[in-house]
Amino acid sequence: MSISFIMGGHVAPDIGVVDEFCARYPLIRQAFDDASAWTGVSAAELRAGAVHDVQQRGMQDTVGKLSQAALVIGMHDELASHGIRPHAVGGLSLGSRIGACLSGSVNRPELFAMLHHERLVPPPDGPAQGLAALTLSGADDPADYYGTNRRGIHLACNHGRTRGGERRRILVGGYLDALETFGKSLPPSTFRMLDLYEGAYHTPLAGHFTDFMAPYITDMTFRDPAITLCVPNESGPLTCADEVRTSYIEHGVTAVRMELLLEQLVRIGTRAVIALGPGLVDELSVDPMKLTRVTAPDDLRAVIDTLHAAINTSTP
């Protein structure tokens, strides 16, 4: 069976779930210890996805990303230790950058050092920015909610359809005043501000992020992916080191679309998709592929038991 791994955007894992993962799976615990060694952030803070010192609250977003990356990489390693390896990887936002690491294009210490460096990105000049989540019907055209049809509103992420196609979730970004005006024109059940995020990431307004991070990323070492690296912002997989570097540099100002990622996975023959960690919409549809989500320790055990048995059965 052709298996691909996908990962979601930045959503810090729940501390209780992380603790249980670390207690039950040694390679996940090791991934958090490694991340601590590479960044200087304590393993306890990484597992919590939060900093304890109230004077360092600016680190909150960064530690959440480090925690999610450690959890996903640890899940990958546990699966690999049982012979379960993907033929392709990909993800949305943070998940796309983790995917590049799992493909072999970026080494782990450099991924974690880069995510840690992002804590230093200065706030943007000008009016305050933000992100909002829209829950639309499957019949709605997402383009009606941003761009030329909605002045000052930019697409950040199209999370795709739910199973059955009844709903679709997108994220839009803009200046807060434009978002607040936009929100008042929609039913409350459709629009929700995402207060956790203080910038309009994945939109043109995040140029300050790109400008700050570009020199750092330029100095990183990139390699050609060793397995297929599918991405949510191109029509096909990335195939060489320079493409991955460009993707990292343009990450902050480029909208991402789940459907682009899934189309690539279908074209390369993926039959089963394993979604590692948080950050994807509930009831995500990946038709015609089969989706298995791993967000709890028992989920990981079920995947290991099922696929390890299948691999052994198919081996002569």
Image (spheres, rainbow, N blue to C red):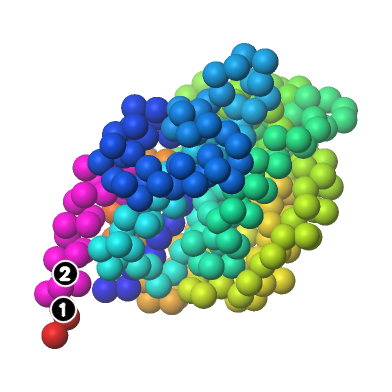
Circle 1 Cα neighbour tier, 10 Å, few/some/many (<14 / 14–19 / ≥20): few
Q: Is residue 78 visible?
A: yes
Identify the residue at horizontal 45%, vertical 42% (top origin).
32
Name the disc covering residue 310, or none: 2
Helix, strand or loop: magenta stretch? helix
Closest to the observer, 72 or 294: 72
Residue range of the region highlighted in magenta in the rendering: 293-313
Asked if 287 appears above or below 255 in the picture, the reply is below
Q: Residue at x 15, y 73 (%)?
A: 312
Q: Amino acid at mark 1?
A: Ser
Q: Which residue is disc 1 drawn over?
A: 314
Q: Give coordinates of residue 3: x percent, y percent.
A: 33, 68
Q: Is residue 261 above or below residue 132?
A: below
Question: Hey, what amino acid is under mark 2?
Answer: Ala
- For the N terminus, the image quarter is bottom left
Q: Say which quarter of the image contains residue 316.
A: bottom left
Spatial CA distance of label 1 from label 2 is 6 Å
- Residue 46: percent from the left, percent from the top? 50, 33
- Mark 1 lies on a secondary structure that is helix
Q: Residue at x 17, y 60 (%)?
A: 306
Height in image: 187 above or below 260? above
